[in-house]
Amino acid sequence: MGTWLDISVYCRRPVTLLRFFEDITARRAHEMAAARLTRMYSVLSDCNQPMVRSRDPQEVFDGICRIAVRRATFAPALIGLIGQWRRTALCLQPATAVGAEWAADLRLGPIKCRL
């Protein structure tokens, strides 16, 4: 990220010039993190809209992925569903993907898990 500086310049007399440098890198990092969280909460709120407006699960998944890619700049976005359960493993199958057409044929599994 580099270093962020706040520079203040004061002129008290015609021949005197005072300059102050303050390192604000930490403050700027906190501001950027707060802005990122605000954006994420806004996207989360927007993701509720497809759930309210549609009864078809596929339309809901598509809407949420589109919002994630357009508003939150996630690329790609993928929603996966848990497929067949086995004794100690499960399979994850993609329901929808935006920004990654390769994910439509993706099959993940079996994934080890403790029951």
Image (cartoon, grey):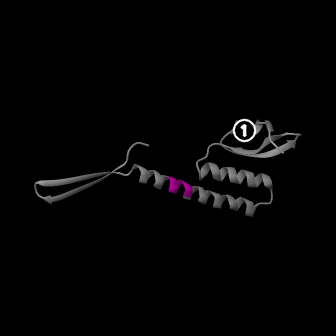
Residue for point 60% across, 50% down: 70
Task: Pick the residue in front: 107 or 32.
Answer: 32
x%, y% of residue 93? Answer: 79, 41
Residue for point 64% across, 58% down: 44
Main SS of residues in magenta: helix
User: In the rendered picture of this protein, how many numbered marks are placed on residues?
Assistant: 1
Please tell me in which quadrant of the rendered image residue 27 appears. bottom left
Q: Residue furthest front?
A: 114
- Give the SS element for disc 1: helix
The magenta-colored residue range is 33-37
The C terminus, quarter of image: top right
Q: Residue furthest right?
A: 87
Residue with the mark numbered 1: 103
Please tell me in which quadrant of the rendered image residue 102 appears. top right
Residue for point 40% across, 49% down: 25
Q: Is residue 3 magenta?
A: no
The N terminus, quarter of image: top left
Looking at the image, residue 32 lies above or below residue 90: below
Task: Pick the residue in front: 101 or 10.
Answer: 10
Looking at the image, residue 30 lies above or below residue 105: below
Task: Pick the residue in front: 7 or 77.
Answer: 7
Asked if residue 19 lies left or right of residue 72, the reply is left
x%, y% of residue 56? Answer: 80, 56
Residue type at mark 1: give it. Answer: Ala
Residue for point 42% across, 51% down: 26
Asked if residue 42 lies left or right of residue 58, the reply is left
